[in-house]
Amino acid sequence: MHTLAKRIHNITPRDVRLTFEDGSAVVLEMHSAEFFQEAFQAEGTTPDGTAYRLVTDGDDDPLVAGKKTDDGWASAGTVEAVEPAED
């Protein structure tokens, strides 16, 4: 199992802080986090309501995030770190 995906799964349903490869970070209120064998899918929203989807196909694949925009979905980047969000 992908280490970062497993961490999200273990933190959910509490909020998580994701740090992307460019150093930016986002806090998500998680709505779902599921494994399908080695594949992982999760969904959450920021405090302002922006939806994010997270996916990976397994250990060797990156955990990538998509962000809902007015035009559909856009890449938010590759997740480099996952932590519980501070209350």
Image (spheres, rainbow, N blue to C red):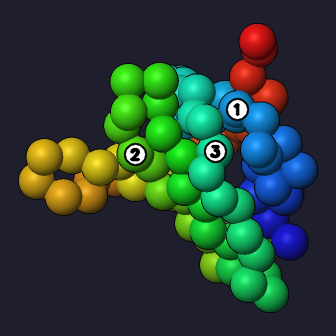
Q: Is residue 83 above or below residue 39?
A: above
Instruction: Give percent across and percent down for residue 36.
Output: 73, 84
Q: Earlier in the sequence, mark 2 or mark 1?
A: 1
Q: Which residue is mark 1?
A: 15
Q: At 75% from the left edge and 58% from the top edge, which residue is drawn?
A: 5
Q: Position of residue 83 (x, y in %)?
A: 78, 31
27 left or right of 39?
Answer: left
The disc placed on residue 83 is none
CA gap, disc 3 to disc 2?
10 Å
The residue at which mark 3 appears reads as 30
Q: Is residue 54 left or right of residue 84?
A: left
Q: Does label 3 or label 2 sit earlier along the sequence?
A: 3
Above or below for 40 versus 33: below
Q: Amino acid at mark 1?
A: Asp
Image location (x, y in percent) of residue 9: 81, 55
Cβ–Cβ under 8 Å for marks 3 and 1: yes
Residue 19 coordinates in the image, percent (x, y): 61, 31
Q: Mark 3 and 2 residues: CB-CB less than 8 Å, in contact? A: no
Q: Residue at left 21%, top 46%? A: 69
For badge 2, the amino acid type reads Ala
Residue at image mark 2: 51
Sequence-earlier tag: 3 or 1: 1
Seen as rendered, the residue at the extreme left is 71
Q: Quadrant of the N terminus?
A: bottom right
- At x 77% / y 14%, what residue is drawn? 86
- Disc 3 marks a residue whose amino acid type is Met
User: In the figure, is residue 70 to the left or right of 34?
Assistant: left
The secondary structure type at the circle numbered 1 is: loop
Badge 2: few (under 14), some or many (20 or more) residues near its Cα, within 10 Å? some
Q: CA distance from mark 3 to mark 1?
A: 6 Å
In the displayed structure, 54 sits above or below 49; it is below
